[in-house]
Image (spheres, helix red, strand yellow):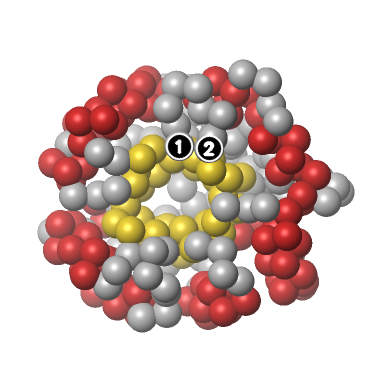
Amino acid sequence: MQFELMASMMCANYGHLEQEVRELEDGGIDSFHIDIMDGRFVANFAMSLNDMRYIASASSVPLDVHLMIEHPNNRVGLFLKNLRPGDTVYIHLEAEYHPSTTLQAIIDAGMIPGIAINPGTSAETITEMLRIVKKVLVMSVNPGNAGQMFLPYVGKKITKLLALKKDMDFELYWDGACTADKIQEYAPRGVNGFVLGTSLLFGKGRPYGDILQDIRELRF
């Protein structure tokens, strides 16, 4: 079964970031998930523009940039000029007055436009934008910190979005508290990829390549 695996780089060891990037790439990671937080849209600061720029320069693996910032249209250009065509940029609709304008800027720059959905955001509120974006990132935890517990009610929202995928022509991705059982349940149902953090990938004391191979060999 085919599905993508993305490494949540806010969970990486920043004392050895070059090594982390190299080992993840050698291990077969599909993309690097970059969480950008401004301390306002979420109550935390995570990765920076410079972190993103370094990882983009250190690897040819695609970047998956998640902008958890207020009014991303005011700042998206800073990120777009440091990315490569084909990288993905997600915004939150709640953070922008006119999200379609920001999404069009992402498209015009040659990037893949995406929407990230907080646990408290309904599928219905993003329906119109589903015709614009190519990817939808569903947060299964409240955004801002790693290591949180899965919120079970998000599963019903994923079911609603899976029913819209074919008609609206988008791909669906899981972010937060991603464990092997979640991949085994949702990959067969049509979720295209999973962001891996401390629940399954980082801090396990094993080579990343071995962990990624085990995930790809899960029984379905």
Q: Position of residue 126 (x, y in %)?
A: 20, 40
Residue marked by disc 1 = 192
Q: Position of residue 164 (x, y in %)?
A: 25, 28
The residue located at (29%, 41%) in the rendering is 170
The residue located at (42%, 79%) in the rendering is 82
Q: Which mark is residue 3?
A: 2
Quarter of the figure that contains the C terminus:
top right
Callout 1 crowding tier (Cα within 10 Å): few <14, some 14–19, many ≥20 = many
Identify the amino acid type marked 2. Phe
Quarter of the figure that contains the N terminus:
top right
Q: How many marks?
A: 2
The residue located at (37%, 27%) in the rendering is 158
Res. 101 visible in picture = yes
Q: Are discs 2 and 1 less than 8 Å apart at CB?
A: yes
Identify the amino acid type marked 1. Asn
Q: Please, what secondary structure does the residue beneath circle 2 have?
A: loop
